[in-house]
Image (cartoon, rainbow, N blue to C red):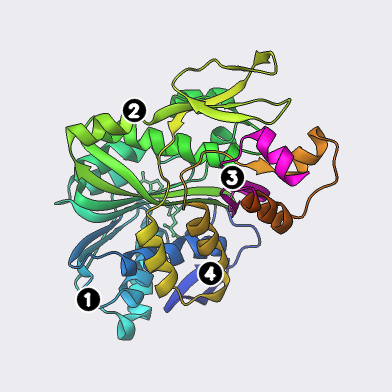
Amino acid sequence: MNTKVITEGKAKIKTWTKEIVSKDMPVFYNPLMKFNRDMSVLLLNSVDKNDMNIGDPMAGTGVRAVRLLTELKKGKIKSIQINDLSEKAVETIKENIELNKDNLNYEDIEVSQKDANLFILESQGFDYLDIDPFGTPNPFLDSSMERISRGGILAVTATDTAALCGTYPTTCKRNYYATPLRNEHMHELGLRILARKVQLIATQYEKALTPIFSYHKDHYFRIFFLCTKSKTKCDEMIKRHKFFHYCNKCLNFETSDKNELTCCERKMDYAGPLWVGELNDKILLKEMIKNNDIKENKEFLETILKESQKNIVGFVDLHRYSQKYKTGIPKTDEAITKLRNNGFFAEKTIFDLYGIRTDAKIKEFVEAVR
Ligand SMILES: C[S@@+](CC[C@H](N)C(=O)[O-])C[C@H]1O[C@@H](n2cnc3c(N)ncnc32)[C@H](O)[C@@H]1O
């Protein structure tokens, strides 16, 4: 298989040419995950943190770490450790560091070839740790909790969307201790199920992991958590693990501590337990939007900020609304204006092209939008 050198951000990266991106590549590189890596760079450049000990335990070609090394502002990095289990990956990481050697803003780089858990546990701890596995992050959560520092940021990617979105509900129950729901809410609910699972593992170490930036995109979920060591915060966090209920007949949705609610004279569908707290830190998002210089990422970030102004779990999908209420499909902008004119919060959502995040109850939504 041929190799080629591509440019991503400010990094030059040796990769392999293969039509289909898969685990079977000599060293894994997915160009679709550029956005994922853009966000690591942007977030770390936007938080009020310098002198960070950074860990990239499953680095693949090393693209993320090299981007951090070439794009983070001076003073951000105190140490950086890059690791992968694969010998070929480690060879490639070293080559990619060499390829970028004239452009690095930090040079004391450690590269290792270990199992990720061993790599994390043998470290002195990290202020930024990026868990980017194939599939579920579950096998790497315990070690991460042991070594993420107080005030540190843990970034978690999950690509097992079929479990988290309810294609395989049993797998979701087994891996995430929660029931998923396969409908228009599935991406938001999957993200919230993942957030709770990470938080549950963290509380065992008396660490409270607050989501500061979270999203679903393409084939994956991504959450950045801020770590605080506090039993009280852990207890408060667990109180915000609840169930999401959905009435398939009238589209009403609500959250509750119970896993059984009725609506339209029948039991509502439910998902959870899941995190019903904020998914994003609004101040951080504003800073990220200010610092973002990639045009195609702007709208996505702005939508997240706008929909995060009010913490609401769930939204109304206009296609479903039109099916259930036998109306034409309203234009999103018009529906938003009508809801606002009636005094409700209304914004688009990143989770659904036809979704409106609103605090209007479904009856109020119908009255306003009809
Ligand atoms: C999804 S890829 C990482 C992609 C990379 N972070 C990027 O942004 O391009 C997962 C990587 O984890 C590595 N890996 C899988 N299991 C591992 C383990 N137990 N310990 C360390 N690395 C592992 C694989 O070799 C692969 O390179």
Give the spatial CA distance, label 2 vs label 3.
23 Å
Q: From the image, which quarter does the N terminus lie in?
A: bottom right
Mark drawn on residue 107? 1
Query: Which residue position is annotated with label 2?
Result: 239
Mark 1 or mark 3: name the one nearer the start of the chain: 1
Residue that appears at 60% across and 28% down:
168
* Magenta-drawn stretch contains 350: yes
Residue 351 position, x and y percent, is 59, 48
Q: Is residue 115 visible?
A: no
Q: Amino acid at mark 4?
A: Lys
Q: Nearer the viewer, mark 2 or mark 1?
A: 2
Q: Are marks 2 and 1 in contact (CB under 8 Å)?
A: no
Q: Are marks 2 and 4 in contact (CB under 8 Å)?
A: no
Query: Which residue position is annotated with label 4?
Result: 298
Number of other residues with Cα within 10 Å of mark 3, as a class: few under 14, some 14 to 19, many 20 or more: many
Q: From the image, which quarter does the C terminus lie in?
A: top right
Mark 1 or mark 4: name the one nearer the start of the chain: 1
**Left or right position of 316 against 180:** right
Mark 3 or mark 4: name the one nearer the start of the chain: 4
Mark 2 or mark 4: name the one nearer the start of the chain: 2
Residue 266 position, x and y percent, is 68, 14
Q: Secondary structure at mark 4?
A: helix
Number of other residues with Cα within 10 Å of mark 1, as a class: few under 14, some 14 to 19, many 20 or more: few
Q: Is residue 234 above or below residue 290?
A: above
Q: Is residue 274 above or below residue 269?
A: below
Residue 246 position, x and y percent, is 62, 27
Mark 2 or mark 1: name the one nearer the start of the chain: 1
Query: Which residue position is annotated with label 3?
Result: 358
Give the spatial CA distance, label 1 vs label 4.
31 Å
In the rendered structure, which segment of residues is drawn in magenta?
Answer: 342-370
Mark 2 or mark 3: name the one nearer the start of the chain: 2
Q: Secondary structure at mark 3?
A: strand
